Amino acid sequence: MRVAIAEDLFLLRDGLTRLLQAHGMEVTAAVESGEELLEAVRKDRPDVAVVDVRLPPTFTDEGLRAALTARQEMPGLSVLVLSQYVEQLYARELLADGSGGVGYLLKDRVLDGTQFVDAVRRVAAGGTAMDPEVIGRLLTHNSAAGPVASLTPREREVLALMAEGRSNAAIAQQLVITERAVAKHTASIFVRLDLQPSDDDNRRVLAVLAYLNG
């Protein structure tokens, strides 16, 4: 797996590089600005980009803008965004793109190396890895109308855990129900959201995007 990192803090950038390399990943670039990220993606075409939202020179949204541009130029590029805070507008822009795996983690989660590496792998494989706090903030502004509103409370619980990137087995354990029950809820979610039969992983991502976009 090939990873490009864009993070302006040297210690964090170096730490992420060493962590991913220790887990057998190839870090194709470790840069500190959005422009450098775009150059690296164009040159190396990594599987996934790990990007801080706020990069030099203004420390506002350079990282996100660079990630969105990279996805336009390289359709299907997976992006895992890191942020100090839950920034709803940025999260929604990333989700609205709808191409490739997507993740949004708060930097505090990076302290858990195993959790972070798992998130990178899920996103690189085309899945999702959304921080629970990000999910909660996005859902407070979800529309009450549309197919998502037809989901039952239990289906919403299942879908929220899917958004975190959890497997059926992990969802079953969290909700104290059987995997068979999770599979039934998942199938019902697909029907309610009018997601036609296709690759199950792809439908899971589409369901999550529909849910978080409201």
Image (cartoon, grey):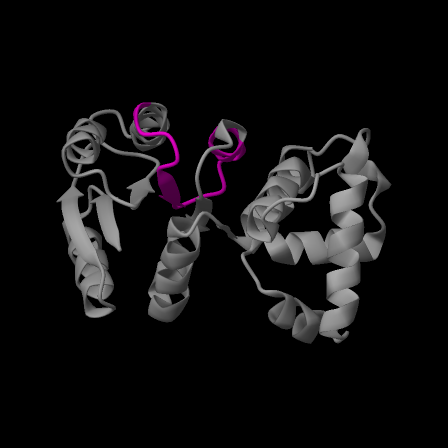
The quadrant of the picture occupied by the N terminus is bottom left
Q: Quadrant of the C terminus?
A: top right
Q: Is residue 36 left or right of residue 71?
A: left
Q: Position of residue 43 (x, y in %)?
A: 14, 33
Q: How many marks?
A: 0
Outermost front residue = 198
162 and 105: which one is in front?
162
Above or below, comparing residue 111 to residue 46 in the picture: below
Range of the magenta residues?
73-95
Q: x%, y% of residue 41?
A: 21, 34
Q: Is residue 85 magenta?
A: yes
Front residue of 53 and 180 = 180
Which quadrant would residue 65 be assigned to in this image?
top left
Q: Residue at x 61, y 52 (%)?
A: 200
* Front residue of 72 and 195: 195
The reply, left or right, for residue 40 in relation to residue 68 is left
In the picture, measured across the screen, residue 151 lies left or right of residue 100, that is right
Q: Residue at 82% of width from left, 37% of height from top?
A: 149
Taking the spot 41% from the left edge, 66% from the top edge, the residue there is 115
Return the x and y of residue 84 as percentages of the image width and height: 39, 46
Query: x, y (%) of residue 198?
Result: 62, 44
Q: Quadrant of residue 197?
A: top right
Say if 125 sits above or below 193 in the image. Answer: below
Residue at 30% x, 24% y: name it: 73
Quadrant of residue 161 within the rendered picture: bottom right
Position of 76 relative to 73 (above/below): below
Residue 145 lies within the magenta run: no
